[in-house]
Image (cartoon, rainbow, N blue to C red):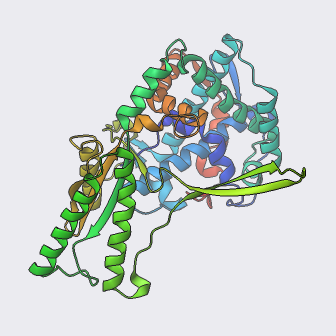
Amino acid sequence: MKKINRFAAAALAFAIATTAAGCSAPGAITIGNGTKYALTVDGYEVPAGIFINNEISAYRTAMYQIAMTNNSVPTFEEMKKVHIGNMEAEDWIQEEATETCKRFVAVEKEFDKIGGQLTQEEEDEVSNYIKSMDKDLTEENGIGEESLFIVQRNTYKQNYLFKHYYGIDSERGCSEDELKQYFSDNTARIKYIAIKTTDADGAALSEDDQRELDDMIDDYIKEINSETDNKAKMQKVDEVKEEYNEYLAAQTTPDDSASTTTTTTTTTTTTSDSSGSDATTTTTTADPYANEVTVTKYTTTVPSEDNAVTTTQAEETEAQKAERALNEKIFGDLPTYEAVRYQYDDDTVYILIKGDITERLTEDDLWNEEQILSVLTQRYGQDFIDWIESITDGYTVEKNNSAYRRYAPFKLDIEDVSLFG
């Protein structure tokens, strides 16, 4: 079963609540003074609005887990009867919301401890987002704008903390060269041609047709590998793919024929001629990495038992097995810059070629600021989660039982909340 990481869900609590806006039942909740704060975490009073927001997030997390396990999205009434681990859904949702509040407090406290400060641009982004969002769901459930501001700022503070401790050359991070090596070890650049080994109706080929197809595949591979330049080999794959598409077109109707799209970049240059007038020249260049795909190495994760839904996970499908085997091939013995034949499944053969990923680690390609943060998150995300949770382990929590009863998840206006917003 694919699961949402608990801290990742906390970080997305704001987004989850707001994307569900407009999908809920009417009837607003008014927060009274006795339930203004839902709980106190290590002396920090958590407003009820933040706790309710986290309950909605936890509710959707539970929905997601069950949907991924059962291959169907549960109804509101079905959710009431669900058990997650050894807990009833209501108890699990409130427990998750409590844990999320603890992590929220940890971020607030640690941010203040290091003297963190959001930029004016970030503050403006928070304000503009809150102003523009549809607040139906949040208002109907007693989540005021002040709580929304606090939650959204908390996500920015979390990102600040992550970059402070786990960024490039930071206290717990690594050098840029080390991060590039990590990315290279876990990412591959691939080109491939998928060749069907069945006829147009999906039936097996005759022996003669299969022999002809095998010879054609061998010729394609020789054609690619005969190039002496690596760049030329990668470009040759596109040419061979066009040949194969023409072969297909000759055997099928025009509507069934495959097509190839070439990506181009248009550059406009303005110069002045001898008379002082501007002359415009437009040149079109082919994308050198057109039709390449980047693949991430599969990792094996073991789900936590206390979050396991009490249903049996379906076994890996044949398609998933084929994808996993292909991934293992790519990161296993697939050579660099050498086209090979790979039997993907009973009906498909791939011509595969892998390029050198390090050649694309430039600022204007695969190594921009956004990508660097993504790779840092991939490498250190779990470490950051563990660090935050090690802090929350030492927190004392005092629950406002009146608030927990009043804002029990199935008393909220979430009956029509959709898994997808």
Q: Which quadrant: the C terminus?
A: bottom right
Residue 374 on image: x %, y %: 53, 35
228 displayed left or right of 216 = right
Of residues 369 and 221, which is closer to you in this image?
A: 221
In the image: residue 416, left or right of residue 248: right
- When asked about the image quadrant of residue 158, the answer is top right
Q: Residue furthest front?
A: 274
- Image coords of residue 387 (percent x, y): 49, 19
Q: Position of residue 388 (x, y in %)?
A: 53, 21
Give the residue at x 23% y 50%. 325
The reply to whether residue 35 is visible in this rendering is yes
- Residue at the bottom extreme of this rendering: 253
Horizontal side of 373 relative to 299 (left or right) equals right
Q: Nearer the viewer, residue 26 or 348?
A: 348
Instruction: Work out whether residue 318 or residue 392 is closer to the camera in this orientation and state it.
Output: 318
Considering every residue shown, the one lying at the far left of the view is 207
In percent of width and height, residue 329 lies at 24, 46
What residue is at 53 percent from the left and 20 percent from the top? Answer: 166
